[in-house]
Image (tube, coloured by chain):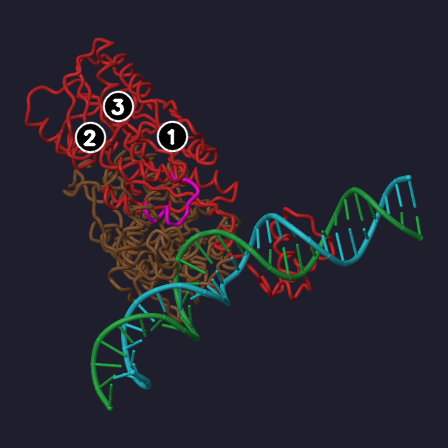
Chain colours: A brown, B red, C green, D cyan
Amino acid sequence: MKDVAREAGVSASTVSRVLTGRTPVVPAKRTAVERACKKLGYQPDGLAAALRNRSSQSVGILVPDIENPIFPAVIRAAEHELARTAVDVVLCDADNDVAVEARRLDTLLRRRVDALLVCPVHREGSAPALRVAARRVPTVQLDRYALADVDFIGTDQVSGMTQVVDHLRVRGVRTAVFVGGYPGMSSLTERAHAFERACADRGIEARRTVAVRFPDAESGRHYARTLLGGATLPDAITCANDELALGIMVELRAAGIRCPEDVLITGHDDVPAAEYMGLTTVNQSLPDKGREAARLLCHPSTSPRQVRLTPTLVPRASTDRDTPAYAVGGVAAEGSHA
Amino acid sequence: MKDVAREAGVSASTVSRVLTGRTPVVPAKRTAVERACKKLGYQPDGLAAALRNRSSQSVGILVPDIENPIFPAVIRAAEHELARTAVDVVLCDADNDVAVEARRLDTLLRRRVDALLVCPVHREGSAPALRVAARRVPTVQLDRYALADVDFIGTDQVSGMTQVVDHLRVRGVRTAVFVGGYPGMSSLTERAHAFERACADRGIEARRTVAVRFPDAESGRHYARTLLGGATLPDAITCANDELALGIMVELRAAGIRCPEDVLITGHDDVPAAEYMGLTTVNQSLPDKGREAARLLCHPSTSPRQVRLTPTLVPRASTDRDTPAYAVGGVAAEGSHA
DNA sequence: CACAATCCTGAAATCGAATGCAGACCGAGG
DNA sequence: CCTCGGTCTGCATTCGATTTCAGGATTGTG
């Protein structure tokens, strides 16, 4: 910066004023400074500015597992929204481990992020570290909550599950099970409760809620195998997320059980594979969630806010025998490519 | 920090020495400082340290589209490897747009990242901005290259395509097409060339290479529709990535064309949906790629390095009529869940 | 016991940009 | 011509941690 000042024949203060643009500078010097910047290829140091301004113009995003496709979609939308105000994103992955998560929170705070967007790994396990963080910087919980008195952006699970159960009822389902009982994630717990409630209200026998070791495809397969060894199939299997549903679907089909002829299956989240596989699921509009999260981050509030977006059911072949199994709805899978 | 110093009855220098641990401090003062830190809830300011050390202890990762599942897997592995040396990741998404990409490079440099990992959006379009960046900080190109004299970590496309073509030849394929000609991505261009070469060497008639508007599922569907309107099907359709292959698969099946009975289809990258759908594809070991990228980032070199990892073919139902369409290989889909 | 060698410590300078303050400069009005 | 109001500029300080340097305390040795 001093070099630029010398080159332009002004003081460093003036260079700073030209660059920030907050204070008027006489046109002649302004252009001289701009010319000097270009000539020397000068690029301001964001760290120094951040130190002085006590604001790093960055937010931290911490997710339990970036390979879960719901997160990239949210991150992308949030990042684009934030870029509009020159804020950028420091991303961390907690590896589904509360200890790693706590360390990542620490490094983010150390880096003086202006705000935090966190999807807690575990309802109870994540709470202590998250509380400490939330006291230091504005924090928004994404998708799952661990603290009641901190901003939260998530999905209206009651709406989603009600849509699923209504959809099943219309198709004549009398008995159903819910797969994906998992106390560590508030989102899944809410889905389980909403499912049971909706079934009760509609006279569907919610045979039971199946707890899983972890809500992934392997657990789905495992459950499918126990189902194959057991007695009668329910009319429908509703899963807490798509991975469970897809795992079940694959395993049952391998055993010759047809879907939707023998059993209806639903998932949740609308991951890309759900479309290819014709899995009926619930779509959360992740871009909206990301944008909304960005807005909460940018406009901190003293009183905790809860935002819940309403999801929409996406009916596909796994619950509708009139839809050929591979005839995926008109819209193409979005985006991905290598 | 001064507060801690006062509380502990020492100077700020001593506090710094205790915290960095590079200089010896007598035990009594050391514990006093540690106690004071805990008592005051002191947390060092990483920005100030970065300013003074002229190293932000962070690297920038810039990908064209974080929703493409190959990137989260690489990012995750890289992030974990980097975390071992207390380096963290500033992530940006270029939105498949070279102009956005250039802006993101600028903000990353401004933030004084110690190194850059970039998957260029476009072979020619990304070159100018990337060249500027590479002159300032150690840069590694990921998966696609735009500059010949800058580190590159990617896949041995010849190996992958050779495995695919060998696999097809054993299954009696005589004619094949390659779908996914796309000049903007070096990886896809290399795959196309490798495919043609492998076919020529093995006496398979490479009927033609189909160019696409963009290598996504929609392009795959579009190609499938033109195929349905045309003359005879080739024996095999080899795609530049899984999204193209899945789009084709879905559209052909909807039209009653069976895979693998009527046509063999292969993809590339082994995205999660490929496993569920039983798509034969090529797996790149993305975690290895991420780790290797992290290593290149941490140990800059003056002479440009090219690292190519050898991928492995993953045979599935789409090329093997003995495998039931849904009987996915023994290993469960990894990781993802909501 | 004296002197040297060693070990620690604190004061001060540094990284690069932003800004309060005071002074320079200009034009207008008395 | 002097003064006042206003605009712009530069000096010096600040943000918070690190590091050099020099001096003080301590220990060891002859």
In this picture, residue B289 sits left or right of residue A36: right
In this picture, residue A261 sits left or right of residue A99: left
Q: Are marks 3 and 2 on the same chain?
A: yes
Q: CA distance from mark 2 to mark 1?
A: 36 Å
Identify the residue at image location x=40%, y=53%.
A2
Mark 3 and mark 1 lie on one chain; the one further toward the N terminus is: 1
Identify the residue at image location x=14%, y=42%.
A330
> Where does label 2 land, which residue?
B249
Q: Position of residue B277 (x, y in %)?
A: 27, 32
Q: Are marks 3 and 1 on the same chain?
A: yes
The secondary element bearing badge 2 is classed as helix
Amino acid type at mark 1 = Asp
Q: Name the subunit of mark 2.
A: B
Q: Name the subunit of mark 3.
A: B
Q: Quadrant of the N terminus of chain B?
A: bottom right
> Where does label 1 land, which residue?
B151
Q: Which quadrant would residue A246 be assigned to in this image?
A: top left
For the magenta stretch, what is the residue range? Answer: B106-116
Magenta stretch: includes residue B328: no
Amino acid type at mark 2 = Met
Amino acid type at mark 3 = Arg
Q: Residue B69 versus residue B99: which sits nearer the camera?
A: B99
Q: Are marks 2 and 1 on the same chain?
A: yes
> Where does label 3 land, which residue?
B191
Q: Quick check: marks 3 and 1 in contact, CB under 8 Å?
A: no
Identify the residue at image location x=16%, y=31%.
B212
**Figure check: A89 above or below B185:** below
